[in-house]
Amino acid sequence: MKKLDVPQGTLDLMILTILTREPMHGYGISQRLAVLSHDHFHVNPGSLFPSLYRLEQDGKLKAEWRTSENNRRAKYYRLTASGRHQLEQRRERWNRVSFAVTSVLEGA
Amino acid sequence: MTLLHRFGSIVRWIARRATAEQDLDDELQSFVDMAAADQIRDGATPADARRRAVIQLGGVEQTKERVRTARHGAWIDEFWRDVLHGVRQLRRAPVFATTVVVTLALGIGANTLAFSIVHAVLVRELPYPNPDRIVFVWFSPPDQPDARDGSTLQNYFAVRDRSQAFEFVGSTSAVQASIAVNPDDVAGGEPVAGPRIHATFPPVFGVQPVLGTWFTDADDPATAARKLVLGHRLWQQRFGGDRTVIGRLVRVDGQDATVIGVMPEGFEILNGETQFWTPSRWSEATMASPSRMLVVAARLKPGVTIPQAQAEMDVLAGNLAREFPQTNKGWSIHLESVYDTYTWRARTPLLLLQGVVALVLLIACANVIGLLLARASTRQQEFVMRMALGSSRGRLVRQLCAESVLLACLGCVCGIALAFAGLRVFMAQNPMTWLPRADGIALDPGVLTFAVVVSAASSILFGLLPSWTVSRRTPTPTIKSTTGMGGVPHRQLRGALVSSQVAVALVLLIAAGLLVNTIVRLSLNRPGIDPTNLLAFQVRLPLGEMVTPTGRDAGGFFTMTFSPRVSQIFGQIQDRLAAVPGVQSVAASVVAPATPAQFQMSVTATGQRPEADQVREPIGWFPITPDYFRTLGVAVRRGREFTTRDSLTSTPVAVINETLARRLWPGEDPIGREIAIDFVNDRPRQVVGVVADVRETSRQRDFAPHVFVPDAQLPLASRGWFQSPRLTMTYLVRTASDPLQLIGALRSAVSEVYRSQPIYGIKLMEDAMEEQLASWEQYLMLLGAFAAIAALLTIVGVYGLVAYGVGQRTHEIGLRRALGASTAAVLRLVLKQGLLLIGIGLAVGVTGSLAVTRILQGLLWGVSPTDPLTFALVTVSLAAAALLACYIPARRALGINPIVALRVE
């Protein structure tokens, strides 16, 4: 099946959501995204890492180097309070957008 | 996120940049490792797994680049990296970098230097409150409505008393006096210049004394004449800046006078020479004098505009012409703002200068564009590589711009240094003598801002073009081959550069050529005296001893009697000087020769009925001693010159020049005729000689009428305030060899006659006449230097562009040679293109010059703005130089070994 492009502006939302459960490294996030989207989304690292860096720079994420479960060193991203706040805002907005779009499509 | 927060994160990020870069490397590495581990777990071989992981990452460098550009403040980082990269690039190409920086420094330096002059003279605020309300009131003779002539007394009082437009009206006229700080010092020091001034003159300018007071209208004429206001410079130099100077008694021309005030620094009127002021008083008796020696200035009432005041003056001029037709018929009045009066003379030359340096900068930029283009081509591989590695096109353009900015910064710094050095040389030539307000020329913040703006503008100009051509490249075809460079758009751009540089340089050189032509003609246009081994110096007799005041005449005017000793002493000095060994001949005059006439009288031929409405033209009047014409080398055409026998007791005589003779008695012999000069108490004089015409200045095209009288025949009883110059005599000494060797002997000869009377103002006539040209020469040198820089840059630029073109075609030329092309054919191939471009440039340049040189009209003398000889000579010279610049690369093309050329591929 052909992979879908991540819709504009939703990558940040998905990254923040994935990180609510536990801190995770970049590779883990991309794998998790593929699994949770039932393999519809495959995020290119060339898109993922710029997003991660920007979120970190904005203080939504905090990064630290840790040893992974497989004994590798990896950079783990953790949601900050500000990131959690932004996630709630973004999710709320997304819910409204998707509800609106779905309503239009089904009501037509 | 708040702005502050964002700013903080940018700062933090920049501070941690080095570690962040390492961090990114590590993270991507860890990503690849984890991806590879998963692949292995799924059954791939380790090598295969690694390959797939890297593919999944989608290129390490590209990802890094995207992360970098995604960050906040990325542009700062990028710019910084671009600058560092640029520095590395420039250090790798020192010849290129030096050439560009020197070229820019010349352009920017020339502009900064020129602007520092323009700024000080034309832009700077005048140091007066509300300068837009100050006007000068000029009188213009018939048919010359823009001429600036002075006012007669009658006219001054008419303007002052009858106009409604002005708050204050004041007038000034130049005098010289010797001021002795110590009242016991009878001789006094060297005379200094200072105007007699009407009491309301400073209020016109809104300037108050820094110490003491100014004259008041209420000052009684009898005592006011003994009051003195010092200029700031005189106060500093002769009175040591003494603040207790007010009330001090000094001697002015041998008479006691009280210092009542000191004017502030920078209060200059018309020139910076003014050193003191004494009040002027006039009476009805001198009202009818046709002499226009007053300069009148006025302050407009608030709310009155110059056109409104001008309308009033037009009416007044009409009234004056009816009331005083002898002096005013056909004359008009024109008002000029103080700014225009101060700057009109300098405006055209300075704007021209600024225009010329702007063109020099354009040529410099064109050169830099050429250099950058050539370099961009050689760096094509680098750009292609970087694009392949993920740099966007915009990124490359930004990088090129950063390099341009870097070059411009270096050029700016070096340019300012050059301007600083140039300014020191310029100021050392004492430009104050010919340039108003030149004392304020400096590299002040305004000028430096200008330099930075000019640099920024030029960096945009020469930075964008090459970037644009680079950005049009697509990576694929270029990466495959290296010979595809210098394609059609490149060649067109190069061609346009060559042609436009040649055109601009030609315009500049033709302008410079016309000005050089002018200076040559001016220096050949000698006044008509022989200045070789001719020394001039002045001797001044003290007024107090030589003049006895005799009260006032019916008109309330000061009267006086000159001692007969005046002409006796002057005569004895002349005899003593003539006896000094080595002296060939000596004469003296109240007015130095070959300078503008200081005194003008109206002269009428007796027997000719003076028409009531005839305009009395003032005529240059020169009291001289015997041997004057022989000493100066001026031919006596008819009759004789004065001798010692022409005295107060003999028949009054006069000598006139040829122009006056033609004016008074056209086609007739003037010898033996009688003339009347309106000098106080003068008697009708018999014309005994006619002499050759002498120019007053070297810029004077036509000759002015002159009348000469024996100094010994000036009436002793006199009146008026313009008599004291009779006590200053300019001696002219013609010697067999260098006159400067004789100064000691001449000095003691003078003191033998009259105590320790100092001689001053010692000058070689040769130098004095050079001085008149010096200001012109200084300006033209400056202009010529800039034109020469432009020409040099152009030649270098044309050479560079043609040589580069030949370099690009090495392969093609080698191929042609290998296929049997003759030497001539190859030469023709290379030269043809260059010749065409130069030809176009020359054609455009000549056309442009024909249109543009008209601006020069006012600066030229004896040369038409479209002088064919100048045009031809300059065009041919530039063409020859440009051809040479093409020929050298062409010769080199001939030397190309076909084998080597074909291997370039």
Image (cartoon, rainbow, N blue to C red):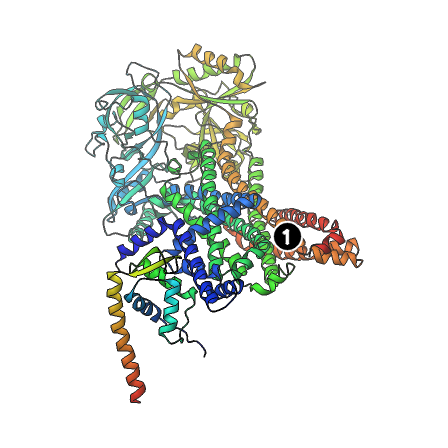
Residue that appears at 25% across and 65% down: A84
Identify which amino acid the numbered label 1 is placed on: Tyr
Give the side of residue B889 with respect to residue A78, left or right: right
Residue B471 drawn at (x, y percent):
52, 61
Report crowding for label 1: few under 14, some 14 to 19, many 20 or more residues within 10 A (C-alpha). many
Residue B651 drawn at (x, y percent):
46, 23
Rendered-image quadrant of the N terminus of chain B = bottom left
- State whether residue B644 is above or below residue B605: above
- State whether residue B176 is above or below residue B398: above
Residue B795 drawn at (x, y percent):
61, 47
Residue B894 drawn at (x, y percent):
74, 51
- State whether residue B831 is above or below residue B733: below
Residue highlighted by disc 1: B804
Rendered-image quadrant of the C terminus of chain B = bottom right
Give the side of residue B344 with respect to residue B309, left or right: right
Which image quadrant is residue B604 in? Answer: top left
- State whether residue B737 is above or below residue B822: above
The residue lying furthest to the left in this view is: B218
Give the side of residue B437 with respect to residue B818, left or right: left
Q: Is residue B709 visible?
A: yes
Q: Is residue A9 visible?
A: no
